[in-house]
Amino acid sequence: MRRPRWLGPYRLLYRIASGGMAETFRAERLLPDGAVHEVAIKRLLDRFNADEEFVVMLADEARLTARVDHPNVARIYEFGVVDDQHVLVMEFVDGVDLRALLRRGRERDEPVDVVSAAFVVEQALRGLEAAHGAQDAQGRPLELVHRDFSPSNILISVRGDVKLTDFGIAKARLSRVRTRAGVIKGKVKYMSPEQTAGKRLDVRSDVFAAGVVLYHAATGHLPFHAPEDAALMVAIRELQPDPPSRHGGGLDRRFDALLERALAKDPADRYPTAEAFAEALAEWRRARDPDYEPRRLGQLVERFFARERREAQAAFAEIDREAAPDAEGTPAHERRGYTRLVDTGHFTDDVELDPVADVDAWLAQRRERAA
């Protein structure tokens, strides 16, 4: 049996993913009554833990996402620090992201069917609409724009659930990290024309990004192409994509019209909201396949990733889940040294917290210690 690693009250089971800024683990939270809550832990890589902008960005993600309560948005539970490691605690989604699903389909020469692709984007749009309508504690609109609606930020579970995630670069009235004028954030190939130009964005920019994701998922091709980012930005602003039906796959003119509107250069010509786009897409999908069920999508995930799921199950089985969190056998929920910086109210106060539970105060204390 393998002893698990612990981060404060969280028992890390195995790593799910690793990116340029953070790594993500499947983990468990042990509660005082003996209950176990399954979560995902995003941990900043060591080289970013000392960077205040990254710390505040993760805190922003926790604070903003906590204001969005919708089944198509992955929940954020809390943001904290333990042993100088900053961690974001999230809902665990047992599945893969859309980028991985599309890539695996290409590798198997078995592209994701267009109805499933439409269903995924439709559901993600419903989560996006909830984010766009989020309010602060006083009921004022947050004016949230995701800015990174892309396949890697759409999670799909083995049950066919679809969850929008990663609001790390979202722009909102409550955001602490301020984007300088002209600074562009996001993945270029999914950007709107106004985003490539560094202009002020509203919800219609995310609608355009959703159109790019739908085009890509349904056809296997991106609507805009260029050898490097600067040229790609020009193409997004100036060129018209081929109609999706030109790529085959049984797509019709009605589908072309959906994407023509979503990908309009002028925001005023697009769907005005994510919900309007979702409804139009749902109408097309129901006409195409009235008997479609989400479990079909979940079965696709299970079939495409059968080997990886077996490996994950084996890794889970190897962990000694009875092992104490430290040499003294102190229960996880009684360990000190864990500071909750952003609490979304999901968990009860079952951790003996350090006195500071505020991002600004924590950063000030850390600067004093480093001086």
Image (tube, rainbow, N blue to C red):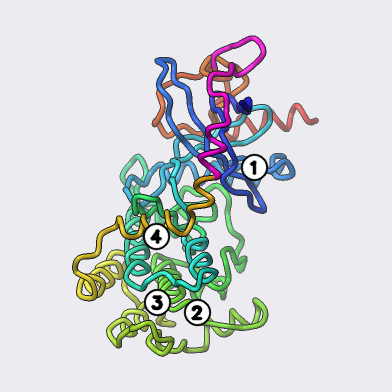
Q: Secondary structure at mark 1?
A: strand
Q: Real-space Cα distance between discs 2 and 3?
A: 23 Å
Q: Which mark is residue 300?
A: 4
- Quarter holding the N terminus is top right
- Residue at 60% across, 17% down: 336
Tell me, yes or no, if residue 147 can be seen here.
no
- Residue at 57% across, 24% down: 320
Residue 92 percent location from the top left of the image? 45, 41
Q: Is residue 323 part of the magenta span, yes or no?
A: yes
Q: Real-space Cα distance between discs 4 and 1?
A: 31 Å
Q: Using residue 50 as the reference point, say whether residue 238 is left or right of it.
A: left
Residue 313 percent location from the top left of the image? 51, 40
- Residue at 23% across, 71% down: 289
Q: Write down the residue under mark 2.
A: 221
Q: Real-space Cα distance between discs 2 and 4?
A: 20 Å
The amino acid beneath tag 3 is Pro
Q: Write down the residue under mark 3.
A: 267
The amino acid beneath tag 1 is Leu
Q: Which mark is residue 44?
A: 1
Count the marks.
4
Mark 3 and mark 4 in contact (Cβ < 8 Å)? no
Mark 1 and mark 4 in contact (Cβ < 8 Å)? no
The amino acid beneath tag 2 is His
Q: Nearer the viewer, mark 2 or mark 3?
A: 2
Tell me, yes or no, if residue 136 can be seen here.
yes
The amino acid beneath tag 4 is Leu
Q: Nearer the viewer, mark 3 or mark 1?
A: 1
Q: Is residue 200 part of the magenta span, yes or no?
A: no
Highlighted magenta segment, given as a residue range: 311-331
Q: Nearer the viewer, residue 89 or 40?
A: 40
